[in-house]
Structure formats: C-alpha cells, structure tokens
Amino acid sequence: MTAPRHLRNSLWSVIQYLISALVMVISVRVFTTYLGAELYGVYSLLTVVGSLNLLSGLGLNTATVRFLAKQGKSRESDTDFLVGLVAAVAFASVMVALGIIWKDPILEAVLHVPERFVPASSDVYVLFLISNVPVLAGQVTLALLDALQLVSISSILQGVYTFLYWGSLLMVFALGMPFVAVGYAALSTALLWCAVVTFVTLRQWGRLSPLWDRGAIMQSIRKQLGFGIQVNAGSVIAMLFEPLTKIVASHLLGIREVGLFDLGLKARSFIWGAFARALYPVFPLLAAEHDGAKRREIVADLEEKLLLVILPVSLIVAGTAWAVAQLWIGADVAEIGTTMGVLTISYLYGSTLMTPYYHFLVVNGEAGRVALLHTLNVLANLLGIILTFQILGFYALVLGSGAAMLVSSAVAFRHQSKILHIRIVTHSGTIRAVTMLGGTGVIVVVMMAA
C-alpha cells in the first residue's frame, strides 16, 4: 500500500469513527435519561452477548484479510472467502442456539441480572444473540474490502451500522416503546446492515468464482482454521476483558455499578477507538509486505511517533475527564470521570502503543504470543478487582482494569525489545522512563483531581 493511500485510509477511518462516536455519545445520554441507572446497567450486561461474534468468528475475518491481501483477486481467494463465511456463520448459529437453550442460567447465574428485571431482559437477550449472526457475516464480508486495501469504504460501512443501530434505538425511546423493542431494533439493524455490506462489497470485489472441488475446499479450511484459531484465541481472551469485568461487577458490587463502569468505558472509547481506527490500515499494510526487516522498520517508526502523540493527549485527558463527565451525563461525575480518565490513559499506553506490534505478530503467524499477552491482561484485571473491591468498592474496577493494561504492555515492550529487537526509540532505557513517568504521572493527576 502506498503511503498516501495508507494515510487516506487512516483518515477516513478516524473521521468515520469520530462521527459514529458522537452519535453514540448523544444516544447514551438519552438512554440514561430514559432507562435510569439500574435498567441501563441491565442493558450494559445484555450487550455482553454482542461479543459472541468474536468468539464464534474463529478469527476467520482476520485470516481472510491476511491471505487475500497476499493472493489478490483469484479463484483461490474466492474459495477462501466463501469457506470462511460459511464456517463462521455455521459456528455462530450453533453458539446462538446453545445460548438460547441455556438462557435462564446465563441471565440469572452468569450475568446476575436482578430477578425483577429478568422478564423484561429475556426476549432482549435472545434477540441480541440472534443479531450476532448477520453482524458476523457482514464483518467477514468486509474483509474483502480490507484485503483490497479499500479501508475507507469499509470504514464508511461500519459507520452505517453505527447510525442504523443508535438511530433505531433512539426511535424506540422517542416512540415510548417497551424495553423489548431494543432487541428487535438491534436485530433489524443487523439484517439490513449485512445486506448493504454484501451488496457494496461484491460490487467492489467482483463476481465470485470459487473452486468447488473437494481438495480446494479442504485445503482452504485447513489453511484458514490453522491461522484463524490462533488469532481467535487472542481475540476471545481480549474479548473477555470488558465483559468479565461487567459480570464480576454485577456479582460483587451491583447492577448500578455495571452501568457507571460502562459509561466510563464508552467515554474512553471516544479517544482510544479513534487511535485504533487510525492504526487498523497497518494490518493489511504489513500483510502485503513480504520483507521481515521492512515490517520491523514500519512497526518501530509507528510506535515512536505514537508515543509523541500519546503523551500530550494523556495530559489533556487527565485535566478534562471530570469536566467531560459533568457536561455529558451530569450525575455520578466522580465514578464516570475517574473511569474515563484512568482507562483512557492506561489503554493509550497499554493497547494503542502496542497495536503495531500486535499486528506484526499476527501477520508473522505468531498470534499465540498475542493470546498470551491478553491472558495476562485478563488475569491481572480480575486479580486486582478481587483483591481490592472490599476496600475500594467501585474504584476496584478502575484500578484493576488500568493496572492490567499497563502490566501487559510492560511485558510486550520487553518481548519486542529483547526477542524481536523492535524498539520505539534508540535506547530501551528511554522507552521505560518515558512510558513509566508519562503513564503513571498522568494517572496520578487524574486520581488527585478526584
């Protein structure tokens, strides 16, 4: 991918995300007003099942991008796409069926939805589960655009989903419809979006001409699943971070705390997500680059530039988190503002700064290392919450999540510096000093502001 195209794709991704995030911010304010703190907490718990598409996707959308970026438009690529799509949708359908069969124990024992909210939540839970299938089909289909390095079009289509989803939910509340209508709105949005994505993507990709012989299909299955399952292990473990935090909060603290933590996460996502979208085009860029030394050079250059951007952004977040929470929600400012400030900063250092490195590992076929780092992240988060919730209460969620991100990033820094010889700057001591002083310093500022 040429530098201008890479920059154009990143710019489109960021613009689309910021517009979508603004729609989300406005919609969430309406949600909290309409639903109240407790019912919004229930809604936050139910959205956990929306992460099922990561679990059931088997990493096949990432595998599709990796292989098709190398193969280009060919009959082998068409075969890989269709095999991946069918496998992902079939597995997702099985997972959805199991989720529906075990609906009651999941709602009551796992998600710990308060008994008085279970009747209203039951149908919404089922509809959220079913909506995972068309969403996953759309995500796998979008991989065709990413493989063609048409990330700008892919970003616009993702923005379409955001507008449809939040717009339909706002309509539900504007019309005074019952809570179950939220589920029907989510499912209708997923089906419509999947149809739009399929139409637009196939117009860009062209007619599909797969190889239908058994040998080609079996080869595609082995190739994609071999790589995709490695990627999926990392994705599933990473997926567990926020849902597990919400589930643990529901059991140890209460449904109100789940809602407050979710609001802080959404505010954090406004900044962190913009960085993530800007960096996504790096994956197809690395996948298309065959020179290992050149890949290392790209990663090192990106991380050094990211560090220079993250430091001032972190300081701005530290000084404005509470004011943003007051302006946005206007209640529970201490909890929401602190969550937003600490998690935004820790995610910038612990996730954003390491994103080029994670892409590098996946492209190099070392997705297992990414899974190990995410496992460390999840375990450190849970341990921090369990050890401190009786003392810190709600703030144990913030401490556990923030500390976990920084711990996993420290391990990742060491690995890329000592094993792969990828460094952000020339001297590794400077890396540690800047990261530790910058990261811990801004977190201290946020905590002192509280």
Image (tube, rainbow, N blue to C red):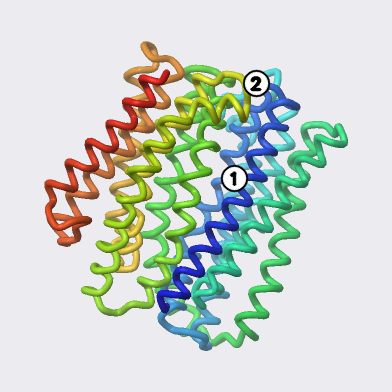
**Given this view, does label 2 or label 1 mark the residue nearer the observer?**
2
Between residue 287 and residue 13, name the one nearer to us.
13
Q: Position of residue 38 (x, y in %)?
A: 65, 21
Q: Could you classify mark 2 by the number of other residues whose Cα lies within 10 Å: few (under 14), some (14-19), or many (20 or more)?
A: some
Give the amino acid at mark 1.
Gly
Point 51% across, 68% down: residue: 9
Q: Position of residue 405 (x, y in %)?
A: 33, 39
**Mark 2 residue element:** helix
Between residue 57 and residue 216, name the one nearer to us.
57
Point 48% across, 64% down: residue: 10
Mark number for residue 38?
A: 2
State which quarter of the image contains the C terminus. Answer: top left
272 is higher (above) or lower (below) than 369: above
Give the amino acid at mark 2.
Glu
Residue tagged 1: 50
239 is higher (above) or lower (below) than 246: below
Q: Using the rendered view, name the quadrant where residue 342 is placed.
A: top left
- Gap in Å between the C-alphas at discs 2 and 1? 20 Å
179 left or right of 68? Answer: right
Q: Which of the two discs, 2 and 1, labels the residue nearer the N terminus? A: 2
Point 59% across, 53% down: residue: 94
Total labels: the figure holds 2
Between residue 3 and residue 376, name the one nearer to us.
3
Between residue 443 and residue 376, name the one nearer to us.
443
